[in-house]
Image: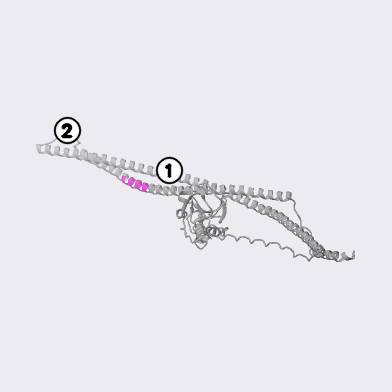
Amino acid sequence: MLTRLPAVVALATVVLAGTANAVPPPPPNPSDSEISASRAEADAKAARVGELTGKLTQAESRLQELLDDVSYKRELANKARVDLETAISEAEAARREASSARVQADAATAAVEQSRRELDEFAAASYAQGSTVGSFSAYIGAKSPEDLLARAQMLEAVSASSLNRLDQVTRDQGTAANLDSAARAALKKAEDKQAAADEAKKVAEQAQQVAVEAHSAQAAATSELQANKDEVERELATARGQVNGLEAQRQQYDQWLTAKQAEEEENARRAAAAAAAQAAAQAPPQRRPAAAAPAPAPSGSRVQTVINRALAQRGVIYAWGGGNYYGPTYGVRDGGVADAYGDYAKIGFDCSGLMMYAFAGAGVYLPHYSGYQYTSGRLVPLSQMAPGDMIFWGPGGGTHVALYLGGGMMVEAPHSGAVVRISPVRYGGIMPYVTRML
């Protein structure tokens, strides 16, 4: 027994040395069901965010349609106002012409009255001289052939003059009637056109108001959807935080368990080594092979550079006409919706301005118009689009452009009042090709 005492002491010394650096008590270890329930809650929130994102995309698409309708109705109202101004101008001209015609008609009527008075005066004078027009009695009482001839000449003159007077009266009456009729017709036509134009203006302005109200209602609904989406995204962040917390606890527990197992293995190894030391020299501890160095991360490509530059602008305000190769700039006036949002006073990007900035990082300098950007590179079928491709909407790609990120997502500067953001790809009105620059 005395001969074995050193070995026992040595073994105790080794074991005590191993427990001197013992692993601390275990951290909390959440159950699999707790982690699964937390993940399920986060997945449900994520699905709800996806659902709201889809609805929000549809709402924003409808909002854009209504905005286009407002613009169209606004132009119709402008046309009606122009037509009304023209009709008012024509009516004023017709009134002036009618007034002038009325003056002429009054003058013609006065001429008729004057002609009648002169005819009456002439007839009365002829009668006073005893020479009634057309009467044979004018010849009675002639005292000589010369007197008879003189009376015949006088009667002929009286008859011709009377006929002239009568003709003049007839002409004056016709002129007065024609002028008055023409004036009335012109004025009636002008007033009818003014009334029709005024009615068209009222209809157009009412249609414009209806369109504006529909747009406002849709804007409110879209805003409510955005608020709901933001709230669910906050809930999702909380749920993911809970998942991450539980998973972190599980990871810490797994690390503790691994450390505890390593401690026990080390203690056992040391105990075995101490026991074997009595029989032979202690063998050197086996060294674990060095872990293989992790493979270096792939270096960033030109495509990734473009994507990173675009993503770095998330949250930057939309400004119509804004953005260039070097970053966001002041927007410009458009005389319409962008002005209503004050884009000209904001520093930001529009859709094509964001593409200019993103691709400039890879040495590609695009024009500031989505229609030109569409034809700036190689056209690839939509079904083959890859990250870094530009996606377009509208005829000739002239309505909107965004940058494809992969996984059905894109980054875009969407519209006035919004910011640069990541969105699901919208397929309504999308062009059948994407443009590949790299």
Magenta part of the chain:
93-104
Q: Secondary structure at mark 2?
A: helix
* Residue in the foreground of this view, choosing between 164 and 357: 357
The residue that disc 1 covers is 196
- Displayed quadrant of residue 13: bottom right
Q: Is residue 19 left or right of residue 104?
A: right
Most foreground residue, 174 or 139: 174
Does residue 341 sit above or below 84 in this rendering? below
Task: Give residue 401's position: percent from left, percent from top.
Answer: 50, 53
**What main secondary structure does the magenta stretch of the protein show?**
helix
Left or right, residue 94 beside residue 35: left
1 and 2 marks in contact (CB < 8 Å): no
Q: Nearer the viewer, residue 159 or 52?
A: 52
Image quarter in which the N terminus is found:
bottom right
Return the residue found at the far right: 1
Mark 1 Cα-neighbour bin, 10 Å: few <14, some 14–19, many ≥20: some
Question: Circle 2: is it few (<14), some (14-19), or many (20+) Cα within 10 Å?
Answer: few
Disc 2 marks a residue whose amino acid type is Phe
SS under mark 1: helix
Q: Is residue 16 left or right of residue 202?
A: right
Please provide percent x and percent y for residue 373.
46, 55
Q: Is residue 42 above or below residue 298?
A: above
How far is the residue under mark 1 from the one under mark 2?
A: 66 Å
Query: On screen, 342 above or below 190?
Result: below
Residue 392: image tag: none
Q: Amino acid at mark 1?
A: Ala
Q: Is residue 215 visible?
A: no
| 116 left or right, relative to 246 | left
Q: Between label 1 and label 2, give the one nearer the viewer.
A: 1
Q: Is residue 229 visible?
A: yes
